[in-house]
Image (cartoon, rainbow, N blue to C red):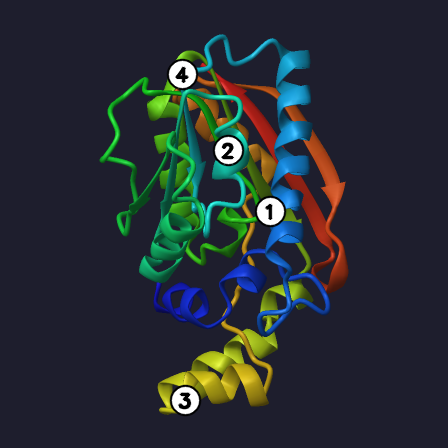
Amino acid sequence: MKAWEDLGAMDPLWSILTYPGRKHGKWNLQEFFDTGEKEIDRLMNKSEMLHRPLGRETALDFRCGVGRLTRALAKHFKKCYGVDISFPMVEKAKELNSEISNCEFLLNKEENLSMFPTNHFDMIYTNIVLQHITDKDVIKSYVSEFVRVVKTGGLAVFQLPSYISAIAMLQPRARIHSVLSKAGFDKRFLYDRLRLVPIRMNYVSEKEVIDLLESLGAFVLDCQREPFPGPFRGISNTYFVIK
């Protein structure tokens, strides 16, 4: 949690989209938000093919960062909520999206979505988020909550690696960052000078995810599988879930 507080304060856009050459505040804000528009356009085109969600009242952007996807979802739903674990991220989201009246940004440090009632959302979406939660039980807890708060007739879409290599799981740079941080090194020094970040990677097997969903009375309408780019060498799944 502390890691995302720090990243949200130091370099919020790059910590959301870690594109080459965009670190240290080098994202152009319009270009950054344009990536969200394109991503949500793809999501809505896919959802129309799946004939879900049936309604367009409410949407949730889970771990919203500065609202890159929340603001794009707001064009398709009457009310959009963005929740994040990082106070600096939520405050920045409020600042950058103040003109969008149907977006609301909330801080949520819990390992659940108890702030929302059951059967509340027509659409739930999260991408490149669950993979950075280090505890698999917490990942599963959030997936369970997606099923609880999505409406019958709604659609929950979440991306989660089903596998990354054992070598990639070692993640030496993140581990070095953790050791030096605990030793008292300044977070700015670690980020700016040593180029170390605390971002970790995790995965849950496809079988575990499907078994969990089925135990909750939900099922996978579709699953998109893609190779993981870069050094992590694995498979990334995007699940389209209904109940």
Q: Secondary structure at mark 2?
A: strand
Identify which amino acid the numbered label 1 is placed on: Phe
Single out the mark in the foreground, 2 or 1.
1
In the rendered image, which quarter contains the C terminus? top left
Identify which amino acid the numbered label 2 is placed on: Tyr
Task: Determine the image quadrant of residue 160.
Answer: top right
* Vertical side of 190 occupied by 28: above or below: above
Single out the mark in the foreground, 3 or 4.
4
Q: Which mark is residue 186?
A: 3
Q: Earlier in the sequence, mark 3 or mark 4?
A: 4
Q: Earlier in the sequence, mark 1 or mark 4?
A: 1
In space, the residues marked 1 and 4 are separated at their CA atoms by 23 Å
Q: 19 or 203, which lies in front? A: 19
Q: Earlier in the sequence, mark 2 or mark 1?
A: 1
Residue at image coords 38%, 15%: 151
Q: 41 or 211, which lies in front? A: 41
Residue at image coords 54%, 51%: 131
Q: Secondary structure at mark 4?
A: loop
Q: Which residue is mark 1?
A: 33
Q: Residues within 10 Å of mark 4 (few under 14, many from 20)?
A: some
Q: 215 or 59, which lies in front? A: 59
Identify which amino acid the numbered label 3 is placed on: Asp
Q: Which mark is residue 57?
A: 4
In space, the residues marked 3 and 4 are separated at their CA atoms by 45 Å
